[in-house]
Every structure is written in C-alpha cells, then in structure tokens.
Image (cartoon, rainbow, N blue to C red):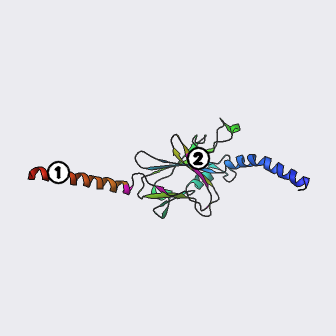
C-alpha cells in the first residue's frame, strides 16, 4: 500500500469517533415505557439546537408529529390519530438514553422539544415504524428500570421488533378460563356434598 494512502486511512480512522459523536445529535430520541395501568407511553425528543436538519423549534415540532407510526396487529396508524401528542420544551436529554450527550456538553442547556404520547392499547401486538421517505433517523429504546435498555437506530422504513402488549387478550382469556375452572370445581364439590 502506498505511504500516502496508508496515511490517509489512518487519519480517516482516527477521525471516525468524532464524526460518530457529531452525528449523534442528528438522531431523534424515542423512549418507550409500559405503564402500570397497561398503557404505552412514548417520549420523542428532537434537538433543534444541535441538529443541522432542523432549522428551528417550529420545524422540530412539525417533524415530531409524524416521525413514528404505530402498527397495531398489522394495521399502521399515525400516533396523533390515536391520542394527542403533547409537545414541551426541554433543555436536557433523557438520562436513560443509551447514547448520552458527549462529555464536553455535560451541564449545557440544549434546545430540545419533546412530544409526550400515552395510549391504552387495543390490540395484542404493536411495533413502531419510521415512515418511508422520512429524512430523520430515530434512536428508539425501551426503558426497563434497572435493566439495560433495549435499543436500535431506525431509519426511513425501519420498524422495531413486534412487542406483545402486557395483559392483552391472551392474559384475559387465561384469567377467564381459570375463573371458569374454579367455578366448575366449586360446583362439582357442592353437588357432591348435597348428594351425600
């Protein structure tokens, strides 16, 4: 390998961590949590101060409206068609993010807007999708308390893995079947007592 090509390769490889770090703020960040009542909560954050693809807070707010869609048992929906997206300003990234901001920005106030969305699932399986043609990428993670978050980067057309809705119909059917079984045993036992 010629010396100048080897030198160029070394310089390029040495600069990759800086390039990767710079790209991090271009990602929208989406955190998903299952709530105790069985509802699904989503927080989607856009960094309009550090993302060259967003020129203003208004552009960030607009982008948040349709950056993710939800597929419920095979049918895709816009989030805003199921429940309102409440957008608020923030100045710090979610501390549970699998990609925290670079150390040199620690304590810095950021220019962020976050869409909060909460919805009571009606299906058994859900997944989230970045619509085809979207120019924004999303760092998506599920917050699992003390467990390390399950995360992935979604680009245009990508989807999360399908997730089973906790306490869905299958759980309800199991509870109903158990109840019928208990009542059946009680009835059989009661009949035996009355016939003796």
Disc 1 or 2, which lies upstream in sequence? 2
**Which numbered disc covers residue 113?**
2
Out of 69 and 174, give the one closest to the viewer. Answer: 174
* Local SS, label 1: helix
**Which numbered disc covers residue 63?**
none
Instruction: Report the span colored magenta.
Output: 149-170
Q: Can you give x and y, in whole percent of width and height, for residue 15 in the image?
A: 78, 47
Please identify the quarter of the rendering in which residue 109 is found: top right
Q: Can you give x and y, in whole percent of width and height, for residue 64 in the image?
A: 57, 53
**Which numbered disc covers residue 189?**
1
Few, some or many residues within 10 Å of mark 2 (<14, 14–19, 20+): many
Magenta span includes 151: yes
Q: Residue at x 62, y 61 (%)?
A: 156
User: In the current view of this chain or complex, which residue is farthest to the top?
Assistant: 107
Residue 121 in sight in this render = yes
* Local SS, label 2: strand
Does residue 126 appear to the left or right of 96 in the view shown? Answer: left
Does residue 13 appear to the left or right of 69 in the view shown? Answer: right
Out of 77 and 123, give the one closest to the viewer. Answer: 123
Q: Residue at x 29, y 56 (%)?
A: 177
Q: Can you give x and y, in whole percent of width and height, for residue 127 in the image?
A: 51, 58
Q: Residue at x 60, y 42 (%)?
A: 93
Q: Can you give x and y, in whole percent of width and height, for residue 82 in the image?
A: 45, 57
Magenta span includes 185: no
User: In the current view of this chain or complex, which residue is farthest to the front?
Assistant: 196
């Amino acid at each position: 390998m010629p010396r100048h090509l080897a030198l160029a390769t070394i310089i390029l490889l040495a600069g990759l961590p800086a390039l990767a770090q710079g790209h991090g703020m271009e990602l929208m960040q989406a955190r998903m949590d299952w709530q105790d009542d069985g509802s699904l909560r989503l927080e989607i954050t856009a960094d309009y101060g550090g993302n060259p693809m967003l020129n203003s807070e208004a552009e960030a707010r607009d982008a948040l409206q349709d950056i993710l869609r939800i597929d419920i048992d095979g049918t895709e929906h816009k989030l805003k068609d199921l429940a309102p997206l409440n957008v608020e300003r923030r100045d710090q990234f979610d501390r549970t993010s699998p990609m925290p901001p670079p150390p040199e920005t620690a304590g810095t106030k950021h220019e962020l807007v976050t869409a909060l969305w909460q919805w009571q699932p009606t299906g058994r399986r859900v997944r989230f999708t970045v619509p085809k043609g979207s120019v924004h990428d999303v760092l998506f993670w599920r917050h699992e308390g003390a467990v390390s978050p399950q995360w992935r980067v979604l680009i245009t057309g990508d989807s999360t893995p399908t997730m089973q809705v906790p306490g869905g119909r299958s759980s309800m059917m199991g509870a109903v079947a158990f109840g019928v079984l208990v009542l059946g045993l009680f009835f059989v036992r009661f009949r035996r007592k009355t016939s003796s």
